[in-house]
Amino acid sequence: MGVNQTLNVGMIGYKFMGKAHSHAYRDVSFYFNPSLKPVLKTIVGRNEVGVKQAAAQFGFEAAHTDWRELIKSDEIDLIDIVTPNNTHAEMVIEAAQAGKHILCEKPLAMNVQEGKEMLKAVQEAGVVHMISHNYRFAPAVQLAKKLIEEGKLGRIYHIRAQYLQDWIMDPDFPLVWRLRKDVTGSGALGDIGSHIIDLARFLVGEIEQVTGMTEIFIKERPMGEMTEGLHAAQSSVQKGKVDVDDAVAFLARFNNGALGVFEATRFAAGNRNKNKFEINGSKGSIRWDLENMNLLEVYFTDDDKSLQGFRTINVTESVHPYVNQYWPAGHIIGYEHTFINLVYELIQGIAEGKQVSPSFEDGVRNQAVLEAIARSAREGAWINVSELL
Amino acid sequence: MGVNQTLNVGMIGYKFMGKAHSHAYRDVSFYFNPSLKPVLKTIVGRNEVGVKQAAAQFGFEAAHTDWRELIKSDEIDLIDIVTPNNTHAEMVIEAAQAGKHILCEKPLAMNVQEGKEMLKAVQEAGVVHMISHNYRFAPAVQLAKKLIEEGKLGRIYHIRAQYLQDWIMDPDFPLVWRLRKDVTGSGALGDIGSHIIDLARFLVGEIEQVTGMTEIFIKERPMGEMTEGLHAAQSSVQKGKVDVDDAVAFLARFNNGALGVFEATRFAAGNRNKNKFEINGSKGSIRWDLENMNLLEVYFTDDDKSLQGFRTINVTESVHPYVNQYWPAGHIIGYEHTFINLVYELIQGIAEGKQVSPSFEDGVRNQAVLEAIARSAREGAWINVSELL
Amino acid sequence: MGVNQTLNVGMIGYKFMGKAHSHAYRDVSFYFNPSLKPVLKTIVGRNEVGVKQAAAQFGFEAAHTDWRELIKSDEIDLIDIVTPNNTHAEMVIEAAQAGKHILCEKPLAMNVQEGKEMLKAVQEAGVVHMISHNYRFAPAVQLAKKLIEEGKLGRIYHIRAQYLQDWIMDPDFPLVWRLRKDVTGSGALGDIGSHIIDLARFLVGEIEQVTGMTEIFIKERPMGEMTEGLHAAQSSVQKGKVDVDDAVAFLARFNNGALGVFEATRFAAGNRNKNKFEINGSKGSIRWDLENMNLLEVYFTDDDKSLQGFRTINVTESVHPYVNQYWPAGHIIGYEHTFINLVYELIQGIAEGKQVSPSFEDGVRNQAVLEAIARSAREGAWINVSELL
Amino acid sequence: MGVNQTLNVGMIGYKFMGKAHSHAYRDVSFYFNPSLKPVLKTIVGRNEVGVKQAAAQFGFEAAHTDWRELIKSDEIDLIDIVTPNNTHAEMVIEAAQAGKHILCEKPLAMNVQEGKEMLKAVQEAGVVHMISHNYRFAPAVQLAKKLIEEGKLGRIYHIRAQYLQDWIMDPDFPLVWRLRKDVTGSGALGDIGSHIIDLARFLVGEIEQVTGMTEIFIKERPMGEMTEGLHAAQSSVQKGKVDVDDAVAFLARFNNGALGVFEATRFAAGNRNKNKFEINGSKGSIRWDLENMNLLEVYFTDDDKSLQGFRTINVTESVHPYVNQYWPAGHIIGYEHTFINLVYELIQGIAEGKQVSPSFEDGVRNQAVLEAIARSAREGAWINVSELL
């Protein structure tokens, strides 16, 4: 632990997620009163100019290009990994061996086997580990969790969840790293499918078996990388083959008997970031949609017969999870606050020496579902998730 | 009363409202089991070709061009008046003197004085009289009324109601009768403003005083009449002066202390028929919108603190007003059903020999509010409605 | 054909669908100007008291208990079959052989084989045949169809459709005929799943293969039948085994490469009749929801970059399909109007001697998808729909 | 100006608005690249314990109890005033005389006279002055402004705006400073009415005349102050008279001929923070609602006739105002970001030596409308706003 009740943070990667995580460390002490005050020590990236710029913008004290050096550094308490998926395993294992606490972006790994090795490493090292499934930490999702845990929805019958985007529909959008299997492992499946799998496991329980299908609508794209986050594209004439899924859909059966219907796609025109779910139980239902993330729709079967209907709850009351730290009722928070809440939980876990959730174990379980879906899509059959664990 | 438990209907006028009323008489026996079965006897209109066509389409046994003859006819039990406003008084008074029950379109009259004479006539004749404020009879509005009467909203603080349309925004839209003061008395005020006044009186109570403003945005328009209901326009080069309001807004104080904010306009682009209100009380609130007329949004202050939110009730349950006569839950009804419900109440009133609601007394009270608003708009001052009664 | 340009209708069955169809025949001549005027001649049901009551309410001239007699009757032009599924085949085949035009409720048959025989019978007889998939005839669905056919959505990538209900969630709800496999063939699958399959085929095209799952959440229920349509239940102490699906979900691949994700359930609390879909194409997307059936949400990728968003179209304009027959813009229609539009198309087909859509061929194709899903659910594998045709 | 391109901020007040402003200074350099980097130097409050706590949480270097000392301090560049309304004038005038740039909370003053003196002071001092009407800076509101300025809505006919809250509906809610006329000048009128007046002036133009009404529903309340921002209340047995409006409504005529209908209330149950407006013009309409502040609904009359409808634009695209500084499309921002955007504009104005908007001139103009409404409510007559300027 850093001196003076601080938590020294070293970050590897500095793009979209680097920005989101950095901001959370900066703001968490403003809104919460965490037991440790995070200090943005060092940020690492391969591009020296880029990482220096990021350090200045995000507020890191230093910028480096060698992540191994960062991991070795004695002054760092927490390693935050926001790099592409194919780098997670190596970094996590070394960081764990160096005794660092770890926050890792999702999906955890390229496959279950890698994930298990990462989990083993952090468990053996006894460090706190967390996977960055930030949507768990939206107040409305936390309220949903509370209602389900209290039995307010009764026995769960159904979950239907979709993560719909449309940012690569243009055939001229280039083959960025998120569209390359060697870097990312899968496409929509791992990138956004992993989020709805995690939410489903969080809210409904473990998934027993799945059957799925994947599709690549645009088979080849111009080579090249986006120059600036997800915003702009720098394309070339040369074309490359797309080898990750543009879209995936799957059916699931949960251990508790619930049925799940899931879909993740980057080809749903007009849906910029539509991460939504509906859960139906014997006593009620809930609906949530990230694009209006402060709202939770809730229905109860025991409401007066003539007054039954979904309530649109503005989850911005002081009685709602995390909200009291922010603003008065009706003053909404946004996407970035999910990370602030997540980072708060992580810091508290580190401070109190107890493991937090979602952990790498969740990461491995999510990965097993991802892998089962991918296998199912190849084989055209139902796959038991437990076979992969 | 007609023989064999029938109710013989004579109708004067055959355009938009003629169609809506005719349909209601045809369908009421299908859905309800009214004590009298309405029979469409005779329809009257000035244009012989037009009224014959209407008779054939609507299912009337006969078509005439002389409304006085209809009123004199012994076989008619109920006179239904769906003509322009400047003809209502004469027809109503003669029909009452002939002992006919009367359904009259809104607004009742050209002014309060006329309305009072009409009311006197029907009261002296002892006939059943009803004004066609059909929106009272939407199941969701009936549910709203029930909730308020049961005290579920507590003391009423606010009503804000708007009736927004946009069908005359095109400056080339011609000077149809609804835009001529000599025919209609006023513009948006009487045509659609009267509906929200009636709903407000129905739900909140009597209005004590008002202050308002009116505006004519397009000062002159091509002469000419629409050829086909509200759908098409036949314009000419010659222009005429518009002398009725395109838009009106007014503030109101109710006898019970509630505040009202009202607006009716034909210049709200994109709002085809947006008749909506919100009512706030000490214990809850309700919202309704004609364009999604099967829904009622309801909020209760005594819902669990963390689960408060407007419930979107699909007012299509068998426990809801009128719904049991139609379809199973979730199968919506439409605009025309408000008339079927209205006609059912009218028939039951006639069969049971008791006055129904909204009566011509409501018509007169609505008219007084209309006249108070018009006067207020001219004088720039608050007007007590009671001064006009 | 009946004399004097009428179409004499004989109906078999008189419950929920009997009411909906009867109403449509009554109202179609009011709103449209069909080439033949339907006359409600005879209605047939097993329960003499019930069918007589229905005849009186619906307006049939006569009521009988023997459907074979009806089919033999020379005065009948059209046989309308609204009985449970296990009776359709026999009735259709005999009616076809008697040279009657036929409207049959969905799903067409108990299985594909039956359906093929029915199709053969009507084709050999040369009669007009139609299956009552009424939702095709909602104006908003027709507008969706038009947009897709005109290429406004481009290449179709996705359809996700759900039909969610909650009317049998109470474990004390009895084993009505819709929950008995010998009568109905399947549960949610055939009853409501068939509707979203038909809509998907109508809008997107033929389905190549499917994989699905079904579930029975409540394994046994009290014996007994509902006394009054879908509204009330008369239960008994004795319990019986539920042998049809409470819920079904399936993935689909279409011939044109689109992916489909479907779900039909009677256990989605708070969803009374939520028949909804979203379709995503390369140039745009559409969304529809039966509970607000007058609305169509439409998104176009070529809208100005800063002004892109789903448009909520109130499909009540005179330029929209069927609407011109009803009311001015913003005055919504309801569930029953889908049947009026359907019956209008049927009558025109009969009058003009040409086959209408959806025909029994659609019925057979829908049945093949249903059967493929059921088989897939049993076998845990993808099934090619063509194998069943 | 501070050394090293910093902007040294001194803040007076530390409650709800103190938190919102402080956060904005902290985050502005993270998201934007402002020409000056704000440094939180000193925060001032009357309660020594409270202000020290605030300084620690918000990140100020020092905390003091004497605002005059702060204003005299040479190291301060910008004075940010977030105290109750009755203190603004004195502080602003002294700060201006000391040559400080000033950001002041709304409403600017207790009356127009005070406001004019404040404006004179800042103009004479040549300092940059801004009033904190933060809602102007929601990206969706900026987009609305852009559309109107570009003429996309044509001639403006209507604005209807409401600011509905419900936080003082409980009669036991105590007489906090916001309910005391000597401290705040008015109730809902100045607190939230000022926001919708400012938005209306920003979007539609100057208001010519108004007529309004105000009401106090709960005439007396327990004495006492809330202990913690707006969240909790510490009440006492002793009661005091409420002398500010619980609710206000007013009609307005704009210089450009538009009509306005406005309402602000703290008694609209279920409306936590419903700041919403709709504007109708000859070519289109827009709708906005703070509770879903990332959305803008837009309607255009020149859209294809069969495809007209309000578009729900998720104003989170990189092409939208301010959004490029935050997150990718579909990742929403919240309440606090309105202040970040506002502070960015303020800093740029200071850096570039040019006056920003909304300035104290806007504050004075808003104040004149507020005063005209209050006078109108007392006199029951229309008041010309210009009479008060």
Image (spheres, coloured by chain):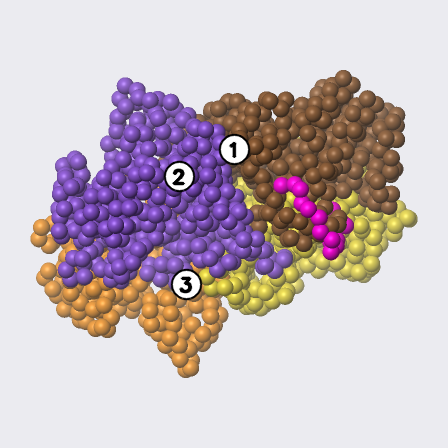
Chain colours: A purple, B yellow, C brown, D orange
Q: Could you confirm whether marks 3 and 1 are on the same chain? A: no
Q: Is disc 2 surrounded by few (<14), some (14 to 19) or many (20+) residues within 10 Å?
A: some
Mark on residue D68? none
Q: Amino acid at mark 1?
A: Leu
Q: Secondary structure at mark 1?
A: strand
- For this rendering, which residue is in front, B203 or A42? A42
Rendered location of residue B250, percent (x, y): 52, 56
Distance of label 2 from label 1 (alpha carbons): 23 Å
> Is residue A243 in view?
yes
Q: Nearer the viewer, residue C188 or B135?
A: C188
Q: Where is residue A314, by image quadrant?
A: bottom left
Label 2 amino acid?
Leu
Q: Is residue B209 placed above or below C308 in the rendered structure? A: below
Task: Label 2: state its secondary structure.
Answer: helix
Quadrant placement of the N terminus of chain A = bottom left
Q: Secondary structure at mark 3?
A: loop
User: The C terminus of chain A is located in which quarter?
Assistant: top left
Left or right, D77 with reference to B21: left
Which chain is disc 1 placed on? C
State yes or no: discs 2 and 3 in contact (Cβ < 8 Å): no
- First of labels 2, 3 by sequence position: 3
Residue C251: image tag: 1
Which label lies toward us, 2 or 1? 2
Who is closer to the viewer here, D6 or B125?
D6
